[in-house]
Image (cartoon, coloured by chain):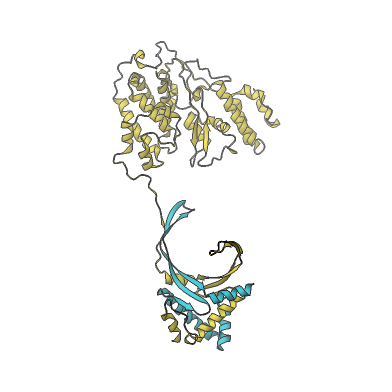
Amino acid sequence: MASNNIYQFNHAALPKADVLDATMLALIEIIRDGLLRDQHVRLHQFGTFRLRWTKARRGRNPQTGELMRIPPCPKVTFTPAKMLGQMVDPNPLPVMPIIETPLAETPSVAPSVVKVVEVPPSPQEISVKPDDPVEGNTESQHQYGNKKWVVGMLAMVPIVIAILQADFSEQGNPAENGPLVTVKQELTVTPEPVLRTDAGAGDSEVLERVPEQESTGVAPASETLVSPQTVNTEPVLAQEQETLGSPRAVGVEPMLAQEQETLVSPQAVAAEPVLTQQQETLASSPQALSTEPVQTQEAPTFHMEPQVHRTESGESLWKLAKTYYQDPYLWPLIFRANRRSLDNPHHLNVGRDLIIPGLQNAAASLSDKDRQLVSEGYMQVYELFRDRNPENALYFLLGAKKYHAQWLRENQQVVLAEHQKHLEKL
Amino acid sequence: MNSSEVVKLLALRLGISQVAAKDLMRKKLEELRLVLSQDQTVQLPRLGTFRIRQTKPRQAYIPGKDCRCLIPTRRHTNFKTSPAFKALLRKRGQ
């Protein structure tokens, strides 16, 4: 065919017109006419010719360097059809996602073992964010990613074994224990549980307070602990019993690290007789912790520092309160501290930093100030839902009444008229 | 202007039926595709030149998966308008 001659020229000059096939020439003319009329020319299973005009713009003359106006310019674009693209590139390589590995080397030993043996972190790390890497644990966190709960569980095993194997026949000399609180010999026992619904402040001087079943973690045996640091281990251990297996118990790790130091250090050896009692209570349910006879002593000093928590998928204020305070009903406290950033307490965005306010006392024996703050939190939630859903808002009003009725009596201006009758019993 | 209109005009210019013109056009375009698939340059007079270009591998970002990716080497068909036709278009546009 005469039309084959044009294909013999690669990067050659313009072939002669008479060599070309008449069909090809006619086709070329038709495409030219269509583009000259500002029309798109679409050829089936080949491609589309389009005419575009570039906008006028300012540029520089490359020879003289002076500014000049570049007028609009026509541009013919060709978009190949799918069939043509498949024939030109029949086997295209797939797009490969780039997987970034942050570490060049991976540890050869199980990181949980390395953590327990080599790195005893300091008590100050309790204020570290749960997601921040603990010193010495970087490799394990990188390798295991978000599975911190697995590492926490594995780290607990040698601690439990050490507790079981320890000899608790002698009590340590309090004087040798350094900053430890002496254990009182005369202890008072209260068989009856103290109800939290009583109006008034939590009395920190009462030694015989027994926690309710609602509040988990603070066991009576914890009051016999001699170290302020070890006091915190009790709610942690009970918390761990509940939250074992929970991937979002991010509060376990920093507390766990603190517990490691207290149990490994020589000062903790003196507290071993107390720890056996704790171990027995750990095996039982949380309810059993509260029903055992209490050997009360001085009120344990509990100071939970304010923390910052970064929310993860599936978390809620209820779960955060349960994690940090061992009492999920204290969630309005967190809502109150983050009122500016939270429009709805039921909706948390992932990756948001929330302030977890501190408590002066444990959840079982809240101070008057803490109760008032919780009541304020409930009232804020009540105001939020008061107009939208008065029926549900009533529950928050009752919650505020439960924690600090006196404060509610003084601040009941925002209460709806239909809910006033519930406040008559204050 | 789609393929059916091109066939009508082709039949008018060549003085043949539309069926024959359609068949002719199909064969001609098939030849062009075959030549381009063999990595050859096709030069159409008074219109432009078809070339096969190979792009270099480059990195890109996949927003849906939130990760970077590597786009490998690809072959594309490139068309360059002839200068005379371009001048004609500019003249018509002014």
Residue B53, percent from left and from top:
44, 68
Q: Which quadrant holds the N terminus of chain A?
A: bottom left
Chain B image colour = cyan
Q: Residue at x 66, y 23 (%)?
A: A410
Q: Is residue A285 visible?
A: no
Q: Who is closer to the viewer here, B70 or A302?
A: B70
Residue at the image point whose x is 42% and y is 80% from the top: A9
A407 to B38, vertically: above or below:
above
Taking B51 as reference, is A397 left or right? right
Query: Which chain corresponds to the colour yellow?
Result: A
Q: Is residue A159 visible?
A: yes
Q: Residue furthest top?
A: A186
Residue B6: x %, y % from top left = 56, 80
The location of residue A370, given as percent across then percent down, is: 55, 24
Residue A90 point in image, percent of width and height: 40, 69
Q: How many marks?
A: 0
From the viewer's side, name the closer residue of A382 and A306.
Answer: A306
Is residue A47 left or right of A70 when viewed as pictured? Answer: left
Q: Residue at x 58, y 83 (%)?
A: B9
Residue sticking out furthest to the right: A417
Which residue reaches farthest bottom?
B15
Depth check: give the residue in front, B70 or A324.
Answer: B70
* Rendered view: A112 above or below A300: below
The C terminus of chain A - image quarter: top right
